[in-house]
Image (cartoon, grey):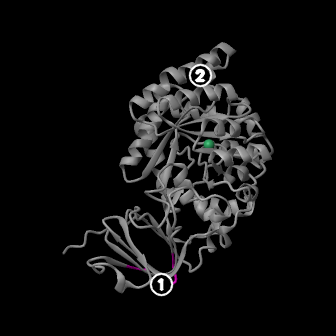
Amino acid sequence: MDKTGNNRLFQNAAQVLTLAGEAAPRRGLVMNDLGILKDASVLVRNGKIEWIGEDLAKVPGGIGDAEIVDCRSKVLMPGLVDSHTHLVWAGHRRDELELRLAGADYEAIFAAGGGILSSVRSTRGASDDALYEQSLRRIQRMRRCGTTTFEIKSGYGLDLETEQKQLRVARRLGKEGFRVKTTCLAAHAVPEESKSSQAARAAFIRDICERILPTINDEGLADFCDVFCDRGAFTISEAREVLTAASSLGLELRVHANEFGHTGGAVLAAEMGARSADHLLHLDAHEIELLRETGVVATMLPGTSLVLGKPFADGRALVDAGLAVAVASDCNPGSCAFENLSMVLAIACYGCKLSPAEAICAVTHNAAASLGISDEVGRIAQGLSADMLVLDTDDYRDLVYHAGSPLIEQVFVAGDPIS
Ligand SMILES: [Zn+2]
């Protein structure tokens, strides 16, 4: 029989991080249990994980034509799931780097028409193809760094046409071999043309609710709706209006919350039953309890804290309180253009005080659960897609110990190595 390419046996890995267990997100200290098998092998057939174990003689029907991937002295782990990115944008904001490093505040840059609105201008001006080409190079680099599933937000359009364009590009990446979930973030910032008056601002919110979201939903362009509920962005009542409209269309919800203060986003995420509340630099005991009770995944974006010189979210407190915690890159043109999620997971340890095992769970299974796809990716379990990483080390903790080193030797998507 011919080899089909994605029938593979990953043989004798020093550690297989299975994250075995249920599809629900892991809450609290359970995040430390990575379900590690030692000197174990994983058989993949037709891109799916078929068998995991130590004794190859026990494989039902034998290994057949599977191509051998020698994993001796290596770690085999699930591909990373980046549950919060803005990776489809045009242009760059390298010029803000020196300003910020010299002490200019992100909110001040934003208020002066820089920040998000400068990316809006470049993204509005880019053709579909130009936007696709720039985003493709970015997502390819992210995948080389170990990410095999990507959430992608719009939000550099702030008008129907450009929001559609961004989401079309994200869907196109999804058809070109990248595993993609899309999120409409039309409520990312108030566009220049709607800033003149309170009435203009209210009209923009109405436009999102009555035209942008329904059109994008009709065209099947979004899986989720997100809103930036924070100081300088949208108020709780504006954000509630947008999320209510999205929910009534059947879209699931995510919220940019509590990045700049106790600004209501986390409370709103709990109230609306969002899948995820993201950033969470400022959380009091009451807000933590609300997120815990409602099962909202608490997503930390520590790369952004590092770049902006802001405090880190208190990951230790979140895990100890029994929350399900995820970690994502927030890859975006301004506040954090980091593409390497395996480095961000290390920052989550040093900055947010997660253990290495908690951070691994946060960028695999819990991130997948926040996207509603934990029955497809995020673990090494029978029936899941064989999206897996081979690490050039025999101990997964080296991802944190040697943060930033090129430890990810090979990336497999549905059993196939990426080039
Ligand atoms: Zn974001």
> Residue 207: x and y, percent?
54, 20
For the question of whether residue 82 can be seen, the reply is no
Tell me the residue at 65%/25% (across/down). Answer: 238
Q: Is residue 265 above or below residue 285?
A: above
In magenta stretch: residue 223? no
Q: Which residues are magenta?
A: 69-75
Q: Residue furthest front?
A: 293
Tell me the residue at 36%/83% (across/down). Answer: 58
Tell me the SS state at disc 2. Answer: helix
Quarter occupied by residue 327: bottom right
Cα distance in 3D space between marks 2 and 1 = 56 Å
Q: Amino acid at mark 2?
A: Ile
In the image, the residue with mark 1 has its CB under 8 Å from the nearest atom of ligand 1: no
In magenta stretch: residue 71? yes
> Residue 139: x and y, percent?
48, 52
> What residue is disc 2 on?
205
Q: Is residue 64 above or below residue 170?
A: below
Where does the N terminus fall, quadrant-wise? bottom left
| Left or right of residue 419, residue 246 in this image | right
Tell me the SS state at disc 1. Answer: loop
> Residue 140: x and y, percent?
46, 55
> Residue 251: x and y, percent?
49, 35
Q: Residue furthest left?
A: 1
The tag earlier along the polypeptide, 2 or 1, is 1
> What residue is disc 1 on?
72
Q: Amino acid at mark 1?
A: Arg
Residue placed most toward the observer, 193 or 34? 34
Residue placed most toward the observer, 264 or 313? 264
Quarter occupied by residue 398: bottom right
Give the label on residue 345, or none: none
